[in-house]
Each structure stands twice: as structure tokens, then as C-alpha cells.
Image (cartoon, grey):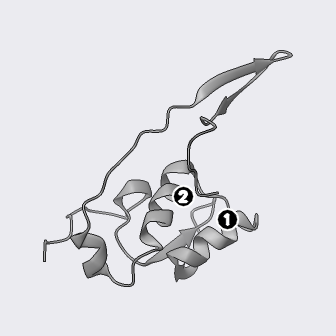
Amino acid sequence: MPAPPSKDGPRINEDIRVPRVLLIDHNGEKQGIMPTSAALEAARAGQITLLPPTAVTLAELAGHQDVASILAQRRVITPLLPRVVVEQERAWLALPEAAKYPL
């Protein structure tokens, strides 16, 4: 089994490699540990907000039962390039319609 990647400090977004995550709020306060699949469900229900890299990583991890199966799978990263939408003097980023975004 390959060794887990080494990283100092908390892992966020694409560095997440475990089946459970620690949620931290916008003030930096710890909110508890939950399974990756539960974090995705909470985000879909509007209970928490996940940034795109975190949501995509958690969706990938939710299909695994343990760390060994996560590390054994070759990860393919497909970049999602948003487009800028400007209407009535307002601008925002929109994901491509064909993108399979988990939320």
C-alpha cells in the first residue's frame, strides 16, 4: 500500500484523503467530525457550504470504505473552467453545463 501524502497542518480541498472530515466554520471554530458522505448531504441540503474543490474531493471520497481503498485508486483530476457571465452590470462565474458537479 502506498504511503499517505505527507503534509504539515490541516488538509483542505484536494489534499483530503480520509473517509471522515473535520468541519471548520467561517470563524475558524471546529464544528465536529463527520463522514465525507454526510458532509456532502449537508451541503446539498444547504446546511453547510463547501467550496468547489472540497465538494469535488468529498464526492470522490464518499465512494470508499477505508483509507486503503482511497490510496489504492489512481486519481484523475479533470479541471472545470468556469465562464464569466455578465448581465445588467453584475458578473458571476458559471460552471460548464456538461460538468458533473456534486452539489
Q: Secondary structure at mark 1?
A: helix
Mark 1 belongs to which amino acid?
Answer: Ala
Q: Residue furthest top?
A: 89
Asked if residue 1 lies left or right of residue 96, the reply is left
Q: In percent of the image, x 39 and y 43: which residue is there? A: 78
Residue at 24% from the left image edge and 71% from the top image edge: 71
Q: Residues within 10 Å of mark 1 (few under 14, many from 20)?
A: some
Verify CB contact (< 8 Å) between mark 1 and mark 2. yes
Residue 26's x, y, as percent?
63, 58
> Would you say 18 lies left or right of 34 here?
left
Reply above or below: 26 against 39: above
Q: Residues within 10 Å of mark 2 (few under 14, many from 20)?
A: many
Tell me how far mark 1 sits from mark 2, CA to CA. 8 Å
Q: Which quadrant of the rendered structure holds the N terminus?
A: bottom left
For disc 1, the marked residue is 43
Which residue is depicted at the point 38% across and 64% down? Answer: 16
Query: Which quadrant would residue 95 be assigned to in this image?
Result: top right
Residue 65 figure quarter: bottom left
Frontmost residue, 22 versus 74: 74
- Please give the name of the residue rendered at 68% of the width and 71% of the height, measured from the top-left corner: 42
Residue that badge 2 annotates: 55
